[in-house]
Amino acid sequence: MLALNAPAAFRPWLTAAGSLTARLKAHSAQFRVQCLHQRTARCLSDEAAAIGMHRPGRVWEREVLLRCDNTPVVFAHTVVPMSATAEDWPLFSALGERSLGTTLFGDPLVRRGVLEFARLREGHPLAQRARKALGLEGLDGADELLLYARRCLYRRRRGTLLVTEVFLPSVLELISTNKSKQ
Ligand SMILES: C=C(O[C@@H]1C=C(C(=O)O)C=C[C@H]1O)C(=O)O
């Protein structure tokens, strides 16, 4: 984290244990998952090894915007190898606008790996996709959008699932609505 030099305000979000969904719900009156797409795709070159693939290949890819009181605060990207079976991730394919987190953190079979952190350089595919999802593509100043991200590998039975969460600057404006979580 220190090597990341993330601004202090981002650190509680980047390092928060537990479900990000639960934390965002505690910081908003209305939380929503806007599903951008869930389809087959080719995983990013820096994802293949993490999900146990020898080279970038076809995966199930889910991308969402997490919205607090309708403001997008996180762009999330999840990949699951095509080799995964319904036994591995029984609820993944039919998630829709339900939060993936609610299926991961409630399941005793799910094992969570360590968090990795990154500051996304401007040309990183996920930075580009986040900007596009926000309609910022090609706008002046959009390139200054410094994006900090974290990712975590989840395992269940023989399955792997990699979640990358890109924190948008708007997350810093959230105020805890739950006094005990100040
Ligand atoms: C992993 C979690 O699920 C969240 C919900 C996601 C989704 O619905 O696609 C993706 C990333 C997460 O921020 C969580 O809540 O911690």
Image (tube, grey):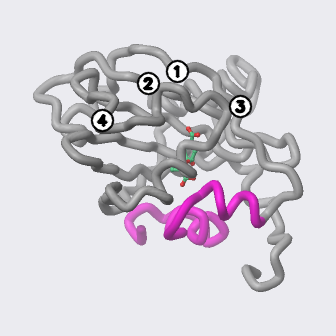
Label 1 sits on what residue type?
Gln
For the residue marked with disc 3, what is the amino acid? Gln
The CA span between labels 1 and 3 is 11 Å
Residue 24 part of the magenta segment:
yes
The residue that disc 1 covers is: 38
Q: Quadrant of the N terminus?
A: bottom left
State the residue in front, 102 or 128.
Answer: 102
Say whether disc 4 or disc 3 marks the residue closer to the N-terminus. Answer: 3
Image: magenta residue range: 1-26
Give above or below for 28 relative to 135: below
The image shows residue 172 at horizontal and vertical percentages of 74, 60
Count of numbered circles in the view: 4
Q: Work out whether mark 2 precedes mark 4 in sequence or the reverse, and give the earlier one.
A: 2
The location of residue 36, given as percent across then percent down, is 64, 23
Q: Which mark is residue 61?
A: 2
Q: Is 13 one of the magenta-colored residues?
A: yes
